[in-house]
Image (cartoon, helix red, strand yellow):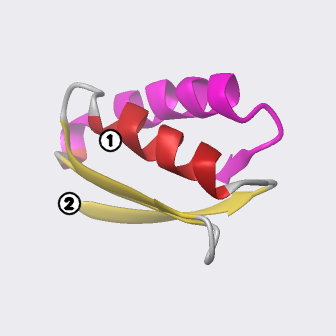
Amino acid sequence: MKKKFKLQGLDCANCAAKMEEAIKKVQGVENASVSFMTQKLTIEAEEEQMDEIMKQVVLLCKKIEPDCEILL
């Protein structure tokens, strides 16, 4: 299942790339992309695992870019 989320407060393209790499390593994530230009996060994962995956993704993103919010 593919889901898209709006990002708020993503300030640099380098941080977006770091977030994307970290999200791709989360267990259960098939694919992920973080677009600095459109301020969007796209994640492909099993629907049953999506809630747990998103909890991990939010924590990861806060470590990399503390000001970034993922609008769930």
Tell me if I can see residue 72 in this picture. Answer: no
Q: Chief secondary structure of the magenta span? A: helix
Query: Start and end of the magenta stretch?
Result: 48-72
| Identity of the residue drawn at 59% across and 23% down | 59
Which corner quadrant of the image does residue 24 belong to?
A: top left
Question: Which mark, residue 1?
Answer: 2
Tell me if I can see residue 8 in this picture. Answer: yes
| Identity of the residue drawn at 68% across and 28% down | 62
Question: Which mark, residue 42?
Answer: none
Residue beneath disc 1: 50
Q: Amino acid at mark 1?
A: Met
Which corner quadrant of the image does residue 12 belong to?
A: bottom right
- Is 15 positioned to the left or the right of 51 in the image? right
Q: CA distance from mark 2 to mark 1?
A: 9 Å
Q: Position of residue 40 (x, y in %)?
A: 56, 67
Q: Position of residue 64 (x, y in %)?
A: 64, 29
Local secondary structure at mark 1: helix
Residue 59 shown in magenta: yes
- Is 13 positioned to the left or the right of 56 in the image? right
Closer to the camera in the image, 37 or 59: 37
Q: Residues within 10 Å of mark 2 (few under 14, many from 20)?
A: few
Residue 4 shown in magenta: no
Q: Amino acid at mark 2?
A: Met
Q: Is residue 1 above or below residue 14?
A: below
Which corner quadrant of the image does residue 23 belong to?
A: top left
Earlier in the chain: of badge 2 and badge 1, it is: 2
